[in-house]
Image: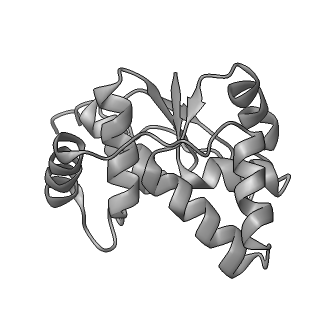
Amino acid sequence: MTVLDAYAVIAYLRAEPAAAEVRPLLTAGSARLTAVGVAEVLDHLVRLAGADEESAALDLAQLDLLDGIAVGADLGLAAGRLRARRYHRSRCAVSMADCIAAEAARHTSAGLATSDPHLLDLCHAEDISTTVLTASDGTRWTPPDRSPTPAP
């Protein structure tokens, strides 16, 4: 299974650069959004892209993504702890929805598909498996160099 962040689905539906990378994840039938991710995608499609509410929900249903991973107490607590540990307004500006997706990936032993550099940094630091997607501007995240700095 692969947990998708909302961007991955939006990129697919808008035929952005990551669409070709998201397509095989959807075709395999094991890609999932969290329930919060479903809400994020619907909000974006309706409020920002001007889609009709029913059409946006139908798009998600046709991709078999409407039934999101439930966010119970355990997942909610883990996501809150993760955000409290890692969030910084400029260095790691991850949303609660991002943290829920990351913890859903960790709890299900799945990877998280995203192009969000802050979310990818967080997952890298937390040893959460990821699938790096191409960003809207065509760039791709690379992990920070963690090699020790040589002594002078």
Closer to the camera in the image, 68 or 114:
68
95, above or below 27, in the image: below
Q: Judge from the rendering whether residue 150 lies leftward or rightward of residue 68; answer left or right.
A: left
Farthest-out residue, front? 54
The C terminus lies in which quarter of the figure? top left
Can residue 126 be seen at all in this image of the molecule? yes
Q: Identify the image quadrant of residue 89.
A: bottom left
Depth check, front residue: 64 or 117:
64
Residue drawn where x is 13% and y is 52% of the image: 81
Is 74 drawn above or below residue 90 in the view shown?
A: above
- At 29% from the left and 28% from the top, the residue drawn is 107
Percent of width and height locating residue 8:
64, 47
- The image shows residue 131 at horizontal and vertical percentages of 55, 31
**Residue 53: image x %, image y %?**
72, 71
Residue at x 20% of width, y 49% of height: 82
In the image: residue 99, left or right of residue 132: left
In this view, the residue farthest toward the right is 15
Q: Please, is residue 147 above or below residue 102 in the view?
A: above
Q: What colouring method underlies this structural image?
A: one colour
Q: How far across and down, in percent of the image, does residue 2 sit? A: 53, 28
Q: Residue at x 32, y 47 (%)?
A: 71
- Residue 34, quarter of picture: top left
Above or below, 47 against 84 in this view is: below
Tell me if I can see residue 138 in this picture: no
Which quarter of the figure has residue 70? top left
